[in-house]
Image (tube, rainbow, N blue to C red):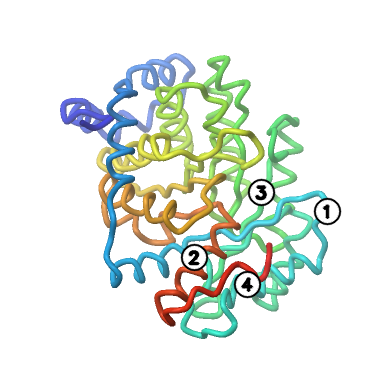
Amino acid sequence: MTATTASARSDLSGAGRSDLSEVGRSEATLRTFLHGLPGVDQVGAEQRAAMLGTRSIKTTSKAWAIDLAIRMVDLTTLEGADTPGKVRALAAKALRPDPADPSCPPVGAVCVYPTMVPVAAAALWGASTRPAGEAGRVHLASVATAFPSGQAPLEVRLADTRSAVAGGADEIDMVINRGAFLSGRYQEVHDEIVAVKAACGDAHLKVILETGELATYDNVRRASWLAMLAGADFIKTSTGKVPVAATLPVTLVMLEAVRDFREVTGRQVGVKPAGGIKTTKDAIKYLVLVNETAGADWLDPDWFRFGASSLLNDLLMQRTKLTTGVYSGPDYFTLD
């Protein structure tokens, strides 16, 4: 059983690209579309996520999965006590997660507050613009738009975004106005995402839904589609600042949304679960979920990321165990 039935997917596919281009132009049209999406079978979604979470993989596949998961990590520091020294140390770890093993891949991105973007850019690239090729393998993301609440005037949020991009960020993680969404002001949320996307310029936009505050899987599906219709390059579960963050069923619903969105529009959108993902076992559950729900096209750091800094050390410990036969323990790697 899946959260989206075959007939429902057929209905979505029948919407057509030209029809979707009109959806965001009026509150009534947008509301009609979002509330016309297939409802999520809560029991089915939770059972399927639980079933996929029991899958095990063998040693060779596990080694591949661990390296892939490392490449998908957004190594993050978002604390009021962040310092330039801490950000530089984080950037060094992002580039060489295991200094003792040059075969270990770098992570997907470093994510910091806008004020720390120039420091991170200098540490990662030696410049304010990400270079092409191997020298620019690690992206620089910045939270913006009054993270984590999103409760600031739009012009303030746009200025926050422009500041981060000007400092060197090539990815922006924005938060939606959950109060507006939960009040049914979908057009307001849509238009704000469109405005932030424009302020990003060439930088990719990750839209944080804060799924722990959306209450229902139906709301998660609606928010996912709303963000994609407004131009999101990624949809992200959480800020990591609320008690309920990423879960397998929520991520399943979001993966179904990006899968169906590509089927309808031809545009692929990434997914980023964030918060509460701490172990290699957790990461592998998510990779299985990606493969079985959206497909192998999403098994790439360009289309799937983990917002989970504490995950990296466990991945490194398990990687060392597989390659050397010795379990190194948590003290072998730096603390983030």
Mark 2 belongs to which amino acid?
A: Leu
Kind of element beneath mark 4: loop
**Sequence order check: which comes first, mark 1 or mark 2?**
1
Q: In which image quadrant can residue 142 be found?
A: bottom right
User: Tags 3 and 2 in contact by the CB under 8 Å rule?
Assistant: no
Disc number for residue 81 = 1
Q: Nearer the viewer, residue 4 or 131?
A: 4
Q: In the image, residue 317 lies at what x, y percent?
A: 51, 70
Question: Which quadrant holds the C terminus?
Answer: bottom right
Q: CA distance from mark 4 to mark 1?
A: 22 Å
Q: Which residue is mark 4?
A: 333
Q: Nearer the viewer, mark 3 or mark 2?
A: 2
Of residue 121 and residue 249, the one placed in the foreground of this image is 249
Q: Earlier in the sequence, mark 1 or mark 3?
A: 1
Label 4 vs 3, first from the N-terminus: 3
Amino acid at dot 1? Ala
Give the image quarter of residue 324.
bottom left
Circle 1 or circle 3, nearest the eye: 1
